């Protein structure tokens, strides 16, 4: 007859390591060893060992790998977001620069158009003609004719670059060529002096006189004249 007894214990040292103890007791009757009697002989065996749980390490490694993958994913997302932000800023800056350039060109075109319009307006304003008429055989400026001279003065003060040419005549139906030349000279000079008295510089005034050698108009009264042309 034989009796067997088994004892076992497992002591967990960590998630990955455990200490295991095992004891085995075997009892044998005397009849198995040619003895007579009922006394048992016992044999006891004790075992001790360490158990390594590699699964925990694998789980930890897997968890670490997952954490690293998540960190890499988040880093990639942040890098992509930063790249998108920089691209958006660059696109916005390029658009702003293009808009600014377009606005600058539009402003330049508008300024050029305004300058051309103003120049044309100045040219139209300067290019006026006034016929200052005189009484036969005289060169005195009458009040009605002074108003014409005043208009020329106003234009020349408004446009400092404007100049005026005074061309004086005498009608050939009256007097003689010599006297008419002198008469037209007086008419040119008296108008020039009126302009100077009003503040117009002498270097902006040109005078010329033709007597009765040229009669630009159809009637004698019209040819007793000083023609003022500004430009």
Image (cartoon, rainbow, N blue to C red):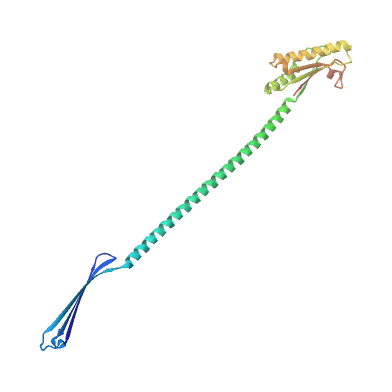
Percent x, y of residue 5: 18, 79
User: Does 64 appear above or below 22?
Assistant: above
Position of 147 compared to 80: left or right?
right
User: Does 90 appear above or below 185?
Assistant: below
Residue at the image point whose x is 49% and y is 51% from the top: 83
Question: Is 47 or 184 nearer to us in this picture?
Answer: 47
Position of 147 compared to 60: left or right?
right
Q: Is residue 141 visible?
A: no
Residue at the image point whose x is 69% and y is 32% from the top: 116
Which quadrant would the N terminus be assigned to in this image? Answer: bottom left
Task: Name the outermost residue toward the front.
Answer: 34
Percent x, y of residue 194: 73, 14
The image quarter containing residue 115 is top right
The image quarter containing residue 153 is top right
Which quadrant would the C terminus be assigned to in this image? Answer: top right
User: Does 200 appear above or below 87?
Assistant: above
Question: Is 56 or 124 nearer to us in this picture?
Answer: 56
Tally of marks: 0
Residue at the image point whose x is 27% and y is 66% from the top: 17
Residue at the image point whose x is 32% and y is 66% from the top: 56
Percent x, y of residue 77: 45, 55
Percent x, y of residue 171: 86, 16
Q: Is residue 27 visible?
A: yes
User: Does 167 appear above or below 43?
Assistant: above
Question: Is 56 or 42 nearer to us in this picture?
Answer: 42
């Amino acid at each position: 007859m034989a009796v067997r007894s088994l004892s076992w214990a497992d002591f967990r040292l960590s998630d990955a390591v455990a200490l295991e103890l095992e004891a085995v007791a075997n009892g044998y009757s005397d009849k198995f060893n040619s003895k007579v009697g009922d006394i048992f002989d016992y044999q006891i065996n004790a075992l001790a060992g360490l158990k390594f749980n590699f699964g925990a390490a694998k789980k930890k490694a897997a968890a670490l790998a997952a954490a690293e993958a998540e960190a890499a994913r988040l880093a990639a997302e942040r890098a992509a977001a930063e790249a998108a932000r920089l691209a958006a800023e660059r696109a916005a800056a390029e658009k702003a620069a293009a808009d600014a350039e377009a606005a600058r060109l539009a402003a330049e075109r508008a300024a050029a158009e305004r300058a051309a319009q103003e120049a044309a307006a100045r040219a139209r304003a300067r290019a006026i003609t006034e016929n200052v008429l005189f009484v036969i055989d005289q060169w005195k400026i009458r009040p009605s004719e002074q108003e014409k001279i005043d208009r020329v003065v106003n234009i020349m003060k408004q446009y400092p670059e404007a100049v005026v040419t005074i061309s004086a005549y005498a009608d050939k139906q009256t007097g003689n060529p010599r006297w008419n030349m002198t008469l037209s000279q007086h008419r040119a000079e008296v108008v020039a002096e009126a302009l100077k008295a009003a503040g117009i510089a002498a270097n902006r005034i040109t005078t010329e006189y033709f007597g009765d050698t040229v009669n630009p108009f159809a009637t004698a009264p019209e040819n007793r004249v000083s023609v003022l042309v500004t430009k």
